[in-house]
Image (tube, rainbow, N blue to C red):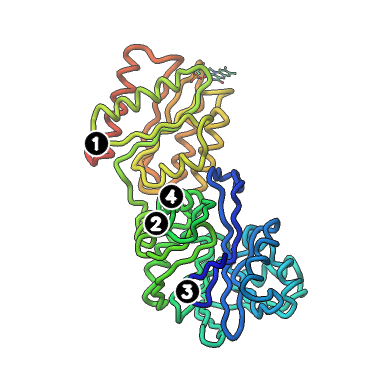
Amino acid sequence: MKTEIRPGIYWVGAIDWDLRDFHGYTTPKGSTYNAYLIVDEKVALVDTVKEPFKDELLARISEIVDPEKIDYLIVNHLERDHFGSFAGVMEVAKNAQVYSGTMGRKGIVDVYGERWPVTAVKTGSTLSLGKKTLRFIETPMMHWPDSMMTYVEEDKVLLSSDAFGQHVASSERFDRDASFDPVAEAKTYYANILMPFSHLIQSLLSKVPELNLQPEIIAPDHGVIWTDPGKIIEAYGRWSRFEARPRVVIAYDTMWGSTEKMAHLLAEGVMDEGGVEVKFFNIRKSTNSEIISEIQDAKAVLLGSATLNNGIFPPVGGFLYYLKGLRPQNKIAMGFGSFGWMGGAVKEITARLKETDMEVLDGLEIRYPATKAQVEQCRETGRMIARKVKGGQ
Ligand SMILES: Cc1cc2nc3c(=O)[nH]c(=O)nc-3n(C[C@H](O)[C@H](O)[C@H](O)COP(=O)(O)O)c2cc1C
């Protein structure tokens, strides 16, 4: 079945129903690799798909035009899920000319040498297909150095590469038909992929008028296509500004249950205050991706670990490393945990949290299981955090 987005603009991607792990990002609902075919006097293909899905891509193109007739292959992004079928497509589309951004061109030449000529484009460069004009917008580090977007001027369709994507495999291609909440899925995607580049997203959003972009449709490289782009642009504004809800995320791991008990007491304390939501995760029983999605718009993160061999329990260490790399902002953060003799985990968590832009509170350490007095101390710490989250002290 052909999926036409606007007259002459088609979705020709692939659906990866079975995908459950995308470079460590857990994808319980699979994903899609979206590629777009624009048929005018000239034919352009924007992006390809992950290599094992090449035949699916070519079959979808063949329903519309003979793939040999592709005149231009536009490479918006060099990651394997979009670039993996590049060589396979070029072998079929023998006369196609390749267009990519400055860094994209460099990346293609690094991999394939001068096997195919590649034209480097810059923000504002255009390519006429006849009645339709493609305009390119380089978006370096959103989320790779080579990332760019392609705008179909006359149709006001923005082919946005990874920005605005969601990892969901679905039979529906458009937001209006989606059997899931596309904004919620886009938040998980944003949190796990784009959070570190929030300042660049802010800058891009502020330049939309100057770039003369008025997209009526945003077609990303994963998930459904936005026919109501205002909704996702507004959400990207909130996420890139790190707007937070009164929510505390508690994530921890434990060997013998004492840190877990502290986590429960902290949660009880937060709930005692009222008006603050708690999200609670045992790190080994949860996925990093789901925890990060809740942290994206939470006001506080409490990270708990038992001390093992003078340091952090490894599952917590792994999560902390992942969190730090995503460069969260506008949050309160605190380490907590149980130890037996010299401790170490909470000190280490606190030091690492201080390397982020979050406001870090003194950690809460307890030797072995909490005593009666320490039970109250944990609860009171939870209450104090809830008050801070609500804006008091
Ligand atoms: C294998 C192992 C290594 C440990 N290493 C340390 C250590 O280096 N320093 C320390 O203070 N406690 C150490 N402990 C003690 C634990 O931190 C302590 O039992 C703590 O209460 C465990 O918290 P949990 O109940 O949340 O797992 C160790 C415990 C185990 C089982």
Can the viewer see residue 334?
A: no
Query: Which residue does the numbered mark 3 point to in the structure image?
Result: 6
Count neighbours of disc 2 (C-alpha within 10 A) and say few if under 14, some if 14 to 19, many if 20 or more: many
Whichever of callouts 2 and 4 sits on the residue coming sooner in the sequence is 4
Query: Which residue does the numbered mark 2 point to in the structure image?
Result: 240
Whichever of callouts 2 and 3 sits on the residue coming sooner in the sequence is 3
Q: Residue at x 42, y 57 (%)?
A: 177
Which label was assigned to residue 275?
1
Q: Residue at x 34, y 27 (%)?
A: 267
Q: Position of residue 277 (x, y in %)?
A: 31, 36
Question: Which of 83/95 is in front?
Answer: 95
| Quadrant position of the C terminus in the picture | top left
Residue 229 higher or lower than 64, as above or below:
above
Query: Which residue does the numbered mark 4 point to in the structure image?
Result: 180
Question: Which of 27/69 is in front?
Answer: 69
Q: Secondary structure at mark 3?
A: strand
Q: Amino acid at mark 3?
A: Arg
Residue 225 higher or lower than 357, as above or below:
below
Q: Position of residue 171 (x, y in %)?
A: 52, 55
Q: Residue at x 62, y 62 (%)?
A: 82
